């Protein structure tokens, strides 16, 4: 399996630059990073990709077995890093990809120089004293929302979603495929995303980490960001003056500045 | 002007009468439009809302304006969808269309709506605010839910059918091939459809202490009718061989049994190769008969390929006194006897060319697998098949038998 086409991997920036891997969250694709990633391409090797099932990834590579847990997605990340032979890479993961990065860095710390977790949550569903913010019934309701909104999706959309890198009408297709995906895959990914529990994995992280938390975020509330910060040894927490779950879209300058500062201190230390 | 007794007004008169009728102010058009309207700041805070939406939701204007965000009005599932899809879509493309969401009214009821939002920008293209229209979608949503329910039902039924089909399919093929001392046996079966039982079949079974029977064939048709015929054919072949092991006699018995079926309209033909295997020192002696079936191949260890033709062998079940033709071969260690159905030779490439269109192609390919053993030959042929036709459209069975070299026994 060719990981380049499987994950529609795109690489920009100088060959010798420090690798910076951006990983999108549930619902969208690598285009989510387009207000942030280009700022780093001058002196970093910037790697973008789509998780299998999202954006222009190869839908035929999707396998319900492999992707029945976040470990499957983490294995993909490690395969991409191995293919590009990345060392000392800083992994920037949004939402569910924050935990995918945590799992990948625990499985093979040798490739990671740091983790930037944007809006992370190790568990969305409340459990005892732990407040993830959602009940199991809420998650079922999300799955229903997905079903209602994918009624318009048809098999005819599939060719537009499937990655055809050499096609020139990229901009057009981007609009068509953005946030679009096969409903069965989206439903499956939503279930895996919102029903995972990775609280115990946080303590196993050995690489330096930064938590970027929005002031108001109903998906990953500030208390959840603080929980992640407390469990990650030696992590930093930066509270962004932004609302919503996507600071890289709603507050790209602040997000970029916080990542740049983390990179600066990592390279000077 | 008068047409059929009606006064028809001149266009300017009509426009004047419209003006008198439509005394709407812009304000009234906004507030009492037949859909909900609201405007929010970029972070979602509600800045303006029309009377229609307030009525639907049971809120006063001051409950919402400057106090709540649009996402606050959504159900929890809707909030999650809003954050993961709607908000990014709006940021990236400046619009989000026809999203199915549930609003929660002041008294806690759900109102299914369809939401379309656009970002208003200033002259420099900087986003200023978000305009949102909200359409009551109660009936549409009920209808869509019914469609979803029906689709899930259909998916469940299809899964049930596929389970049933694969179970039935398994009963028509040997659960496992027997162990024959000194002989490697391998088979491949590809069902073209997971919804239908295929019509190809094969088996290898002991006849007595040192003789083995084997067959491979293809019944006419697919589905339940074909499954009935396959079942009858398999058991007839095995029973017939108990009475008389001569391959031509076995096929003649099958011919009579198939001719006796009284089920007008149901298929009753098949093509089949039936054979006997008997060890002879390190070798195996093979005698076989064919009824209208593609000729088996013997891939010799040295790369020669013998095509075991049986000219004149007729389709089984078609004629009262069908004629079947026997042949024989000797397999020495390293040789492999290959039986296959027309799913292999009639597989079509993208340009329509059949794999077996050129009769030399299959023997030539097979020569390349000489000396690799029965299992490897079957695997290689299965690869040839998938490389030739992406999605083989017909069922395919391949059976290979090859004496092992004495040192490998």
Image (cartoon, coloured by chain):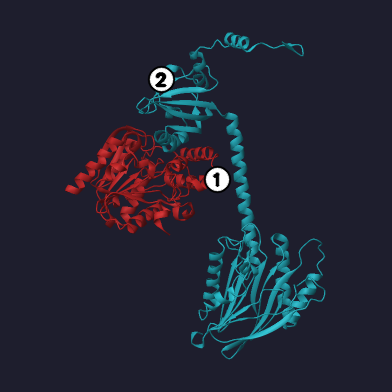
Chain colours: A red, B cyan
- Residue B25, given in percent of the width and then of the height, sits at 51, 12
Read off the chain for label 2: B
Query: Could you say where residue A170 lies in the image, as x and y percent from the top left?
Result: 43, 44
Depicted A23 relative to depicted B208: above or below: above
Q: Can you tell which of label 1 and label 2 is closer to the viewer?
A: 1
Tell me the residue at 40%/56% (across/down): A3
Return the chain for callout 1.
A
Q: Label 1, on which residue?
A: A156
Asked if badges 1 and 2 are on one and the same chain, I answer no
Which quadrant of the structure image shows residue B67?
top left
Residue placed at 58% from the left, 61% from the top?
A: B351
Find numbered disc 2 in the image and state the secondary structure of the residue it sits on: loop
Give the SS element for disc 1. Answer: helix
Rendered image quadrant of residue B225: bottom right
State the mark number for residue B408: none
* Residue B161 placement: quadrant: bottom right
Of residues B114 and B128, the one drawn nearer to the viewer in this rendering: B128
Front residue (pair A154, B251): A154
Judged left or right of residue A87, residue B38 is right
Q: Which residue is mark 2?
A: B65
Furthest toward the bottom, the residue is: B281
Dividing the image into 4 quarters, which one contains the N terminus of chain A? Answer: bottom left
Q: Position of residue B173 (x, y in %)?
A: 64, 69
Q: Assess whether mark 2 and mark 1 are in contact (beta carbons under 8 angstroms).
A: no
Q: Is residue B106 visible?
A: no
Tell whether B346 sits left or right of B372: right
Q: Is residue A165 above or below residue B184?
A: above
Identify the residue at image location x=64%, y=70%.
B341
How many neighbours does mark 2 have within 10 angstroms: few (below 14), some (14-19), or many (20 or more)?
some
């Amino acid at each position: 399996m060719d990981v380049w086409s499987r994950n529609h991997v795109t690489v920009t920036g100088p060959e010798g630059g420090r690798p910076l891997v951006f990983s999108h969250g549930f619902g969208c694709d690598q285009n989510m990073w387009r207000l942030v990633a280009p700022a780093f391409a001058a002196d970093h090797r910037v790697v973008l990709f789509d998780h299998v099932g999202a954006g222009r990834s190869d839908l035929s590579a999707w396998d319900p077995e492999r992707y029945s847990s976040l470990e499957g997605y983490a294995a993909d990340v490690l395969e991409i890093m191995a293919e590009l032979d990345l060392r000392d890479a800083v992994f920037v993961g949004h939402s569910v990809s924050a935990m995918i990065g945590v799992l990948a860095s625990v499985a093979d710390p040798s490739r990671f120089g740091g983790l930037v977790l944007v809006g992370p949550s190790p568990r969305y569903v409340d459990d005892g004293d732990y407040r993830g913010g959602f009940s199991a019934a809420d998650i079922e309701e999300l799955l229903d929302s997905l079903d209602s909104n994918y009624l318009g999706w048809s098999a005819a959309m599939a060719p537009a979603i499937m990655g055809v890198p050499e096609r020139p009408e990229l901009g057009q297709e981007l609009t068509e495929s953005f946030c679009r995906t096969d409903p069965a895959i989206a439903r499956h990914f939503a279930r895996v995303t919102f029903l995972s529990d990775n609280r115990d994995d946080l303590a196993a992280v050995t690489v330096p980490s930064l938590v970027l938390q929005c002031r108001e975020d109903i998906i990953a509330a500030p208390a959840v960001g603080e929980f992640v910060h407390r469990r990650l040894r030696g992590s930093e927490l930066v509270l962004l003056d932004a609302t919503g779950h996507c600071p890289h879209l709603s507050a790209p300058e602040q997000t970029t500045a916080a990542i740049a500062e983390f990179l600066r201190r990592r390279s000077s230390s | 002007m008068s047409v059929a007794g009606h006064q028809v007004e001149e266009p300017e008169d009509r426009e004047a009468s419209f003006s008198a009728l439509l005394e709407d102010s812009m304000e009234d058009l906004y507030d009492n439009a037949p859909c909900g309207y609201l405007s929010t700041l970029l972070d979602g805070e509600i800045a303006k809302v029309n009377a229609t939406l307030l009525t639907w939701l049971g809120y006063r204007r001051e409950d919402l304006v400057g106090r709540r965000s649009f996402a606050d009005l959504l159900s929890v599932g809707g909030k999650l969808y809003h954050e993961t899809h709607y908000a990014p879509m709006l940021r990236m493309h400046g619009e989000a269309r026809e999203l199915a969401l549930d609003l929660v009214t002041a008294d806690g009821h759900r109102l299914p709506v369809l939401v379309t939002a656009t970002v208003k920008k200033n002259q420099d293209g900087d986003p200023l605010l978000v305009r949102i229209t909200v359409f009551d979608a109660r009936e549409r949503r009920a209808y869509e839910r019914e469609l979803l329910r029906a689709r899930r039902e259909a998916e469940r039924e299809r899964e049930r059918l596929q389970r049933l089909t694969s179970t039935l399919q398994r009963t028509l093929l040997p659960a496992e091939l027997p162990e024959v001392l000194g002989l490697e046996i391998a088979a491949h079966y590809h069902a073209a459809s997971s919804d239908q039982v295929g019509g190809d079949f094969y088996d290898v079974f002991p006849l007595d202490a040192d003789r083995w029977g084997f067959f491979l064939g293809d019944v006419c048709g697919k589905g339940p009718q074909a499954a009935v015929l396959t079942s009858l054919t398999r058991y007839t072949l095995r029973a017939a061989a108990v009475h008389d092991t001569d391959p031509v006699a076995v096929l003649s018995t099958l011919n009579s049994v198939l001719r006796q079926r009284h089920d007008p309209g149901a298929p009753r033909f098949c093509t089949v190769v039936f054979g006997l295997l008997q060890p002879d020192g390190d070798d195996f002696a093979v005698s076989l008969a064919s009824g209208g079936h593609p000729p088996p191949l013997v891939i010799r260890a040295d790369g020669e390929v013998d095509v075991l033709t049986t000219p004149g062998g007729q389709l089984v079940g078609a004629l009262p006194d069908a004629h079947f033709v026997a042949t024989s071969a000797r397999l020495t260690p390293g040789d492999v006897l290959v039986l296959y159905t027309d799913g292999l030779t009639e597989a079509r490439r993208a340009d329509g060319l059949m794999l077996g269109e050129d009769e030399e192609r299959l023997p030539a390919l097979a020569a390349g697998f000489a000396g690799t053993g029965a299992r490897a030959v079957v695997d290689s042929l299965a690869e040839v098949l998938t490389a030739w036709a992406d999605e083989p459209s017909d069922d395919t069975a391949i059976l290979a038998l090859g004496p092992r070299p004495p040192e490998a026994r």
